Amino acid sequence: MEKVEIVLALIVLATVVAVSARRLSVPAPSLLVAAGVAAGMLPFVPRISIDPQLVSVIVLPPLLYAAGEDLSWRELRRVWRPVTILAFGLVLASAAAVGVVAAAVTGLPAAMAFVLGAILASTDPVAVTALGRRLPLPAKVHTLLQGESLFNDATSLVLFRVAVAGAVAGGALSWQRAIGQFVLLAGGGAAVGAVVAACVAVIRRRTEDPVLETVIALLTPYVAYVAAEAAHVSGVTAVVVASVILGGLSASLTNPGIRLQLHAVYGTVVFLLESIVFAVIGLTLPGLVADVAGAPGRLLWQVVAVAATLLAVRFLWVLPLAAFLPAPAGRRLSFRTAAVVSWAGARGVLPLTAALSLPLLTAAGAALPGRALTVTITVAVIVLTLTVQGFTLSPLVRRSGIAASPSALSAEDTLADVRTARAALARLDELEDRQSVAPAVGAALRRALNHRIEEHPELSDEHREHDLSARAVRRDLIAVELRELDRLHHAGEISDATRRRRQRALDLSDSALGEL
């Protein structure tokens, strides 16, 4: 019963803090972690221990899936070179640099120092997505951060497994074995994810029941993860690949009503899981610090040294890539762009899961040396990046000059609204030529569409039709607008964020028409 009470208390705490973060206009993960640390230091709060299997199997898949669904393939293709360099080269460089620094300042054995480097080498997609959700970043920068955090996990996972094997067995690292494991884990995970996505797409195209569609969508990340892990390949990669594929097909898999329902259900699930997991990260830190021998000041110095190493290596690696990223008004802002991208490289759920999964014993049966210190430093670095970088990221974006201007976003919305309205008018002309729509209905719809073109107002209920034929025609026109919206997105005339906003507005209009 005590565990149930703890879970309920966590849900209440996380929900209250997350709502407060929205009211205060601060990143929810940062406030949740800070509140968790504060609560964990209270004497009457019981110590929380995290089961790594619970996090990796229950919490991680839907959060990864939600992050991958938001990634646009079209925009990812525009930044695939820097994403590839960051997902491979930066992970290797970060792991090596942290390993050297950790061995020098923490006293960890060389093998365990490299394990720590492998754990912290990659950014976390859950944390990066949660922190960047409300930031006015340009589409290319946003896609770069998302793509890097989603695709660098396979690299760090292979490094982690190889490093742990070396630490447990006490042997040297085999780079040939590491490359073979990477191909197996990443390639196998991608294949499993693609197969799961193909099967789910076939099923969802033949399903029109909203409840069944919702259940399938909720189960998809778990199926991809479990199937990949059962095949001894990367479950994380499988979930990411499945989510990106299905996210790109979402418009063709479901109707507007089901899309709205899935958006609401998944939004609730992601909100609860993110809130709880970030609060738990903060709650665990005080207990871990208490278990580590030595002065707290020395531990703080070690954590700061490791975090500073990650940030310095990241900045030096990102700076040359800033030439591929946008600068407003034609100005060269390579330094500022690199600063924002570097500062946005937060750590979160994935490093936590990796650290907690460290074995307790070596192959000889002795206690794994430095395990407690490795886990503590990992959690402390996660807390440090989520709080210090998290609270200051939004001001940095605004001061850097790379933030997407409200006028640019408004211009994209206006373009999408006008072009889709014109496509609907063309379809209405066809229907009227075939005398498939009553004159009064056609005139009312034409007035509404022309009003959108001339004034660009928000969609309203002023011209909602109540008879069956009018609703049927309006729904047909909405379908044409959705197709035109997809065409604009594929042609590169509007961003993925604009497409999603306009699609949701059209879905709401379709849903408001009711059943035919």
Image (cartoon, rainbow, N blue to C red):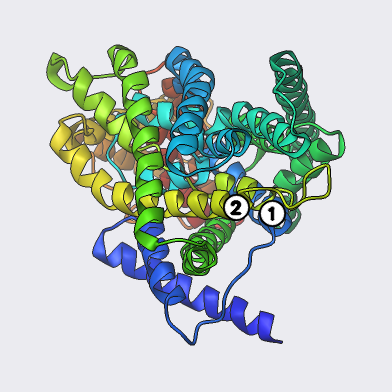
Amino acid marked by disc 2? Leu
Q: Residue 514's mark?
A: none
Residue 441 rendering spot, x and y as whole percentages: 43, 44
Residue extending furthest right? 231
Mark 2 lies on a secondary structure that is: helix
Q: Residues within 10 Å of mark 2 (few under 14, many from 20)?
A: many
Q: Residues within 10 Å of mark 1 (few under 14, many from 20)?
A: some
Residue 139 visible at all: no
**397 to the left or right of 380:** left
Above or below 196: residue 36: below
Location of residue 119 by image quarter: top right
Residue carrying label 1: 214
Residue carrying label 2: 262
Residue 337 rendering spot, x and y as whole percentages: 25, 25
Residue pictured at 27% horizontal, 33% vertical: 340
Residue 377 rendering spot, x and y as whole percentages: 49, 50
**259 to the left or right of 399:** right
**465 to the left or right of 257:** left
The residues bearing labels 2 and 1 have C-alpha atoms spaced at a distance of 6 Å
Residue 231 rendering spot, x and y as whole percentages: 86, 33
Residue pictured at 70% horizontal, 56% vertical: 58
Label pair 2/1, CB-CB below 8 angstroms: yes
Pick the front one: 296 or 466: 296
Amino acid marked by disc 1? Thr
Residue 486 visible at all: yes
Residue pictured at 52% horizontal, 69% vertical: 287
Above or below 111: residue 328: above
